Amino acid sequence: MNVLIAEARKKYHEELLRQGVLTIDTKGVPSNADSSSKISINIAKGIAERLMAETHDKAVGQTSGAKFEQINMDFLNKTFPKLQNIRPGKWIIAKIGNRSAIKTSSFSQYEHLEYLTRLITYDAKLASCIRRDYMVAPDVVIYRKLVSDEEINSTDIIIDDTVCNRADLREKNGGLPILHASISAKWTMRSDRAQNSRTEALGLIRNRKGHLPHIVVVTGEPLPSRLASLGLGTGDIDCMYHFALYELIEAVKDTGSEDSIEILNSLIEGKRLKDISDLPLDLAI
C-alpha cells in the first residue's frame, strides 16, 4: 500500500535532485553547504549521500532558491488538499513574489495595507512617518476561498440576512480570500536570510486584522547552529521544517560533534524543528 505523504516526500527529494537543487560539486561540496565550514560540508554531504545526490557544478543560488520554492509548493499541492476529512475547505496553494499579481494585501486580514500604500504614495509627509517594510511577499501561500450561503446552510439553516453580515468567511459579504498559511522557503540559511524570514513573520503578526495565518519556514540548511539562529525562541514563526530531517539527524551523529548534536536535539525536542512530512498535518490545525 502506498502511503501518500511518504510517497510525496520521496518524490520531493527526487525533484530536488532532478532539478539540480541538491548536488555535490566536483570539489565534494554539496549545494546547501557553506564551503568555508568543514562541519557544514560533512553534514550536508551525509544528507546528500543518503539521498543519492549526483555530482556536478553547483547551481546559481537565486535559481536554486526559486526551484526550492516551486518544489515545496508542489509538495503541499500533493498533500494538504488530501486532508479534507480533517481540514475541509476550498484551498489554493500558490507561489508568489514581488512580480506576482497576488500580494499580502490580496487577503482579508491584510487588505488595508493596499489602501495604506496608496495613501503614502501621494502624501510625502505621511510617508516620512510610516515605515514602508510592512508589505511582505511570502514565497508560498495557502489561502481559503470564501463559502457560499448554500454551503453554510447545506445541513441546517445556520444563517440568513439578519446575521453574520461581517463574517470574513461568508462569500456574500464580498470580502477577500483568507490567508491560511505563509511558507518561507530558504534553501540555505546564512544570518541575513534567517532574519528576512523573521522580518516577514513579524510583519504578518503586527499588521493583520483578524485571524493570524500559520507562519512557517522550510529550509535545506545543514548546520544546526544556523538552524538555531531562527528556530530557537517563540513568538514569530510557528516552526521550522527541514527538507530531510531524518537524514540530517543521522548525518549530524556521524560527525561526532557534541555541540551540533546537542543543538539539533534541543531544536527537535523543543518542537522548533520538524521534518517536511510533518508540515501538511500541522497546517491542518
Image (cartoon, grey):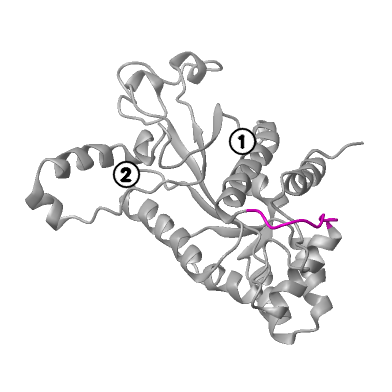
Say which mark, if any, is on residue 87. Answer: 1
* Secondary structure of the residue carrying numbered label 1: loop
Dominant secondary structure, magenta: loop
Instruction: Give amino acid for label 2.
Output: Lys
* Residue 49, image quadrant: bottom right
Work out whether residue 285 can be spotted: no
Pinpoint residue 100: horizontal percent, then vertical percent: 43, 35
- Residue lying furthest left: 125
> Contact, CB < 8 Å: mark 2 with mark 1?
no
Residue tagged by mark 2?
209
174 above or below 52? above
Q: Is residue 245 magenta?
A: no
In the rendering, at what x and y percent does residue 33 appear?
67, 68
In the image, residue 260 sits, relative to residue 271, either above or below, namely: below
Tell me where the magenta segment starts and ends, as one range: 51-59
**129, above or below 176, in the image:** below
